Amino acid sequence: MDIQLYLKTKRQLVDRTLGQLLPSADEYPSIIYEAVRYSVFAGGKRLRPILCLAAAEALSGDSVKLLPVAAALELIHTYSLIHDDLPAMDDDDFRRGKPTCHKQFGEGIAILAGDALLTLAFEVISNYGLEEGKKDPALGLAVMEVIWEVASAAGLRGMIGGQVLDLQAETVSVSGEELKYIHEHKTGALFRASIRTGAILSGARSEELAALTAYSENFGLVFQITDDILDVTGDPAIMGKPVGSDQKNRKATYPAMYGLAKSRDLARQAVEKACASLSKLPGDTKPLEGIIRYLLERES
Amino acid sequence: MDIQLYLKTKRQLVDRTLGQLLPSADEYPSIIYEAVRYSVFAGGKRLRPILCLAAAEALSGDSVKLLPVAAALELIHTYSLIHDDLPAMDDDDFRRGKPTCHKQFGEGIAILAGDALLTLAFEVISNYGLEEGKKDPALGLAVMEVIWEVASAAGLRGMIGGQVLDLQAETVSVSGEELKYIHEHKTGALFRASIRTGAILSGARSEELAALTAYSENFGLVFQITDDILDVTGDPAIMGKPVGSDQKNRKATYPAMYGLAKSRDLARQAVEKACASLSKLPGDTKPLEGIIRYLLERES
């Protein structure tokens, strides 16, 4: 399959949905609506929503119907980027070639824009749950499970735990164990929840959910390794940000810990494991296979 | 009724529930768990959870059962305090006589502690919804409605919108209309959602929900007016913070706009309106009456 075309088509669907879900920038007080739209539409591959949709397809589910929930996952991702970029965190001035939210709108508004996107995600998913639950109580309960799943992934034992350790890693050197913790929590947890969301809303049986969870955990690993590799070998013009920042910040990375060649091996092994776990799913698993293989070749 | 005793009893129940809901400070990475517990247990009247419980009682509902959801409202309140105190927002060093979260743990951890509490609130409510929804799908749907209600109240058209305008009000003077907007959104929205949460989970009929909503809106008004008055007339030793800060910061307040006497009149009128709206509810409305009258006499 043409994975580039698949990703582009889904990205457009997700972007259209995000445009519908986000309040208009004409609302009052306008600066926060501008800030929210600025960050959500600053680019981005929409990987989390697309993984949610692709997981549904792997179970022969109706992925189009899930678009609002899929888009809500991107709202959570964008919130985390805005807060991670703040001066008190990673202190980044640019993201995807554009000034970060706090550089553009000030720190107070950036904190609130992140808060707003996190909150909006739960508003969007619960709104979906109300609509679906009125028609089918079982589906309403599945949406409730998704809210729990997403909140746990975003919370203390998920993304926030990872970011705390990452913050501490800026001043003290971290072990391989701690590096693994950071990645599994900071980025892995939301990939996992995104895929599980698509599965849960498509009525996954427990062994199907387990297979997709295994895929998602390998996906997170491959994403992080290739992300670290790109920070060493990537083209700043394509990536929209300077490379080498991990080394400059003495950040714990796979290439720093294992070298480039071994890091690439680890990524390839995880891709094969992920694809193997898809073998017994009833629907179209080519998108999930294509997306994880694409990570190995990505340039940004 | 002895409203002081009522408030104390409920506060203890809420505190115990919060203690059970918050992860132990032994978890890893411990600093964020410490920060979260530090802020949640820094004192506080637990008004929002108590209003939720009292609304349930006004409809003859089982308020004890609602404790986890009521406590989640306090998590959202605490998140908003932590973020509001940040240097990029109100830049407050003390709250309730203790150093604010960012003074104690650093700015990065304080931002994450706020994020964590906001997220945990939705985790707690959805967990409750899963448990209840498995027994009774209709109750599951009511919990979904509560998630939507709370997310909307906390979001762009609620608390965040109010905080944005409050942030702007520090540099430009605001009109009476804008002052009203700030209060209705920054503090009013969560009081409203707290009361509606208790009502929705007690199976309120639409006219009962309307009556309690009317109460809640007057409650928010009385709370804000008396809060502003305390900043002029309060005893710093009892309040645990310096008074006169609104005037120093040239903040828009009721006493500044209308004078003390007229502000007190406005508060008394709103109390009577609130109590009148409770007249047709089937349960025990004395707690709700007592709480709003208590606002007129409070010293902190």
Image: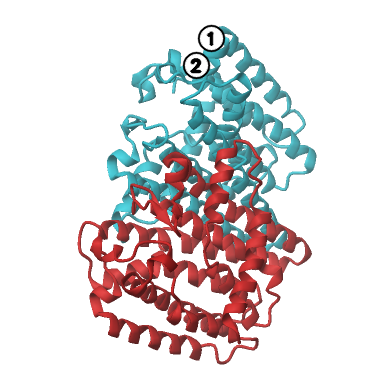
Chain colours: A red, B cyan
The answer to whether marks 2 and 1 sit on the same chain is: yes
Name the residue: 20% across, 60% down: A172
Q: Position of residue B196 (x, y in %)?
A: 66, 41
Quadrant, the N terminus of chain A: bottom right
The secondary structure type at the circle numbered 2 is helix
Q: Which residue is mark 2?
A: B229
Write the residue at 59% across / 60% down.
A72
Which badge, 2 or 1, is on the more N-terminal residue? 2
Q: Residues within 10 Å of mark 1 (few under 14, many from 20)?
A: some
Residue at position x 63%, y 65% from top?
A: A14
For the residue pair B282 and A214, the one nearer the viewer reads as: A214
The picture places residue A260, in percent across and down from the top left corner, at 28, 80
In the image: residue B101, left or right of residue A129? left
Q: Which of A64/A177 is in front?
A: A64
Mark 2 near mark 1, Cβ–Cβ under 8 Å? yes
Left or right of residue A32, residue A126 in this image: right
Q: Secondary structure at mark 1?
A: helix
Q: Position of residue B58 (x, y in %)?
A: 67, 37
Instruction: Judge whether residue A55 can be spotted in this image.
Output: no
Which chain's residue wears label 2? B
Most extreme residue toward the left is A172
Distance (Cα) linking label 2 and label 1: 7 Å
Quadrant housing residue A128? bottom right
User: Looking at the picture, does residue B219 appear above or below residue B147?
Assistant: above
- The residue that disc 1 covers is B260
Give the amino acid at mark 2.
Ile
At a point 34% along the width and 54% down the height, the residue shown is: A90
Chain ID, mark 1: B
Instruction: Sort mark 2 into few (<14), some (14-19) or many (20+) by Cα contacts within 10 Å.
Output: many
Whole-percent x, y for residue A138 in the image = 70, 69
Three-letter code for the amino acid on which mark 1 is drawn: Leu
Q: Is residue B187 above or below residue A239?
A: above
